[in-house]
Image (cartoon, rainbow, N blue to C red):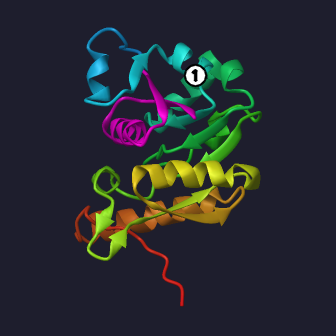
Amino acid sequence: MEIAVVGTGFIGGILGRALARAGQEVTFGSRQAGEGGGEVAGETPARVAPVGEALAGAEVVILALPGAAVGELTAEFGDVLAGKLVIDATNRMGQPVANSRAALPQSVRYARAFNTLGGENMADPVFADGPADMFFSAPVFDRSVLETIIEAVGLRPVFVGEDKEDLIDALFLLWVELAMRQGRGRRLALRLLEG
């Protein structure tokens, strides 16, 4: 599967490198491609390219850039995003809506994932009793694609439903409350237990 990771910061780097190590074809979309931006790939086969080039060749796009930058990305590359599966990993901190769905073209296949854990938990997703859960929302026909991607990062996928980004955002707010405001620390994950 060809995956473009737009964003070469902490979250984008963790996700892209994990997916590349798992055998996915990953291209980091970077505005600094060719200017030392290649370091984000580390010791993986992932490559770094200008954003437009990364998007053009991708089947799946993971947005791991600041939420405020998604509107600008859409203005420049909205036609390239049309029809693609876009996984929104952004968080608009302090805004009434944490996700970036409204800033994306309506023609994308929208999924919400990778925003309910601190990045260090995605870099090291296994706790004493197993992997952390990654709750996600996606179109039903794209569910298996998301499950494959989430498992490739080392997390256990938990499908919440289609168009349920509000529930995923609520889990993000819960994680922030527990980890940051209550001071429990960032090495904290949520898990679904079933009997």
In front here: 33 or 195? 195
Does 38 sit left or right of 191 as displayed?
left
Residue 174 visible in rendering: yes
Does 63 sit left or right of 82 as displayed?
left
* Membership of 87 in magenta stretch: no
Question: What x and y, as percent, mark residue 137?
Answer: 63, 57
Which residue is found at the position 72% from the left and 58% from the top?
162
Corner quadrant of residue 15: top left
Q: Does residue 81 sit above or below 138 in this rendering?
A: above
Q: Which residues are magenta?
A: 1-30
Q: Residue furthest top?
A: 34
Does 188 sit left or right of 98 as displayed?
left
Q: Does residue 87 sit above or below 137 in this rendering?
A: above
In front here: 180 or 53? 53
Question: What x and y, as percent, mark residue 131?
Answer: 37, 66
Question: What x and y, as percent, mark residue 25?
Answer: 49, 30
Residue with the mark numbered 1: 55
Residue 96 visible in rendering: no
In front here: 50 or 77? 50
Which residue is found at the position 33% from the left and 59% from the top?
125
* Three-letter amino acid code at the position of disc 1: Leu
Badge 1: how crowded within 10 Å, few (<14), some, or many (20+)?
many
Q: Residue furthest bottom?
A: 195
Q: Secondary structure at mark 1?
A: helix
